[in-house]
Amino acid sequence: MLNDNEHACGEAAELIAQADGLMITAGAGMGIDSGLPDFRGDQGFWNAYPALGALGMRFSQIASPGAFRSDPALAWGFYGHRLQLYREVRPHAGFGILRALAASMPGGAFVFTSNVDGQFQKAGFDAGRVLECHGSIHMLQCLAPCGDALWPADAVVPVVDTLACRMAAPLPACPHCGGLARPNILMFGDAGWVDTRIGQVASRLDAWLARLRRPVVIELGAGTAIPSVRLFGQQLDCPLVRINPREPTVGSKRDISIPLGAQEALERIARALKESI
């Protein structure tokens, strides 16, 4: 007899088998199986960055342009550590399953994610089909900003004192004005974020969706605290498979709720697809 999760994964497999395109929407929970922190709550954030906990700094305070202006070495200590972490981490097996699912569909896949870690590209997804709605840590911009220029962070080699969460000089600089550079990430209270990359990919996404007749959305690890990803998937006129161990509730009878982690749910869906062949 199938349990509830097995039944839900089987239903998800049926939807996927009938789809002609896979819309992948992903939040912070997608990276947990790869070993990435999700910063859930102040205490979880401070456990990951005890130096910031000692200062009583919340995620919203360090993840802001104001932090770069008031204490650049501390702000770059936080983002430099994350940059190196994201460079080193290996995407979990669920990414490969998503690629295989997309390969079986005429329209392939498109990704909409609030994650800034670049894991979808590292896992082999076409960068031109990954819309990073909050930007990417692998791209830089001017803090001021002096213009709309963006450039890769490839040349940044962070030397971070992890006990103090401070990055050693020289800190990344804007090649155009010489001022301080920052990651091209949408931060809290951020009026200076350069969003030109988003518009370019959004146009491709709209054209891709217009060509599909039977798309399906697989949402992974997207919470309600910052609902950008959930709202995007919900506004599309197609079935949605929500994979989320903490907030799995769906609002439509045609949608499917799977209260599991991303990798486990995708592995179960993949098994259900094989069994149905």
Image (cartoon, helix red, strand yellow):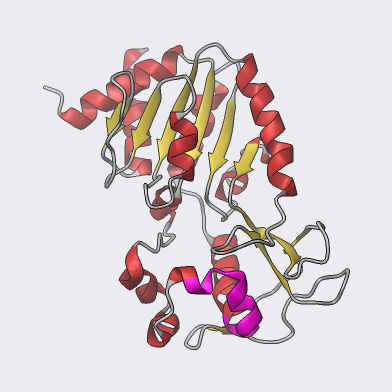
Occupied quadrant, residue 9 = top left
Occupied quadrant, residue 137 = bottom right
Q: Residue at x 57, y 28 (%)?
A: 109
- Where does residue 160 sit, x and y in percent of width and height? 59, 82
* Magenta segment, prevailing SS (helix, strand or loop): helix
Q: Residue at x 59, y 68 (%)?
A: 84
Q: Which residues are magenta?
A: 61-74
In the image, residue 29 above or below residue 189? above
**111 relative to 193 in the view: left or right:** left
Occupied quadrant, residue 112 = top right
Q: Residue at x 65, y 61 (%)?
A: 191
Q: Residue at x 28, y 38 (%)?
A: 248
Quadrant in which the N terminus is drawn: top left
- Where does residue 190 sit, x and y in percent of width and height? 61, 62
**Residue 159 in view (yes/no):** no
**165 relative to 156 in the view: left or right:** left
